[in-house]
Image: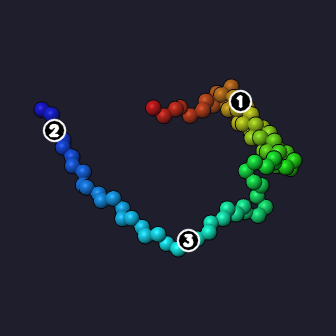
Amino acid sequence: MTRVVTTTCRYKRPPKKRKPGPAIEQRIVAAKGLPLRGAAPSQAQTEEHRRRGDAADALFHEMKRRIAAAVRSGGAPPPKKP
């Protein structure tokens, strides 16, 4: 026998309208020292980005090499969880 499940949603009133406050002049201010969104990256930033990418690649290849050595020597990696 199947049970019939019924649910009811409680009515939620819409939020109250806000009264207009005093007019405040808003300005967009860029943080000091940060490049603007369309600006070209500096040479130092591109070199650092490349250096970090090379370090990540080297770390990944080292990890693969260690796993391959462990599998070859008989110490298989731990089994996957079901």
Question: How many C-alpha atoms fall within 10 Å of the one at disc 3: few (<14), some, or many (≥20)?
Answer: few
Residue 23, disc: 3
Compared across the picture, whether 13 is left or right of 17 comes to: left
> Considering only vertical position in the picture, is 72 above or below 13?
above
* Quadrant of the rendered image containing residue 75: top right
Residue identifier under label 2 = 4
Q: How far from the left and from the top, in percent, is residue 32?
A: 76, 64
What element does badge 2 sit on? loop
Report the mark closest to the observer, 3 or 1: 3
Please give left or right for residue 20 compared with residue 32 in the image. left
Q: Quadrant of the N terminus?
A: top left
- Residue in the image at 87% along x and 47% along y: 43
Secondary element at image label 1: helix
- Answer whether residue 73 is visible to the viewer in this image: no
In the image, 1 versus 32, the foreground residue is 32
As helix, strand or loop, the secondary structure at mark 3 comes to loop
Pair 3/2: label in front: 3
Dividing the picture into quadrants, the one containing residue 36 is bottom right
For residue 69, the mark is 1
Q: Amino acid at mark 3?
A: Ala
Amino acid tagged 2: Val
Task: State whether residue 27 is above or below residue 43.
Answer: below
Q: Position of residue 37 (x, y in %)?
A: 73, 50
CA gap between label 3 and label 2 equals: 55 Å
- Callout 1: few (<14), some (14-19), or many (20+) C-alpha neighbours within 10 Å? few
| Nearer to me, 73 or 23 | 23
Where does residue 6 sit, x and y in percent of width and height?
Answer: 18, 43
- The amino acid pointed to by label 1 is Ala
Quarter of the picture containing the C terminus is top left
Say which label, 3 or 2, has the lower sequence index.
2
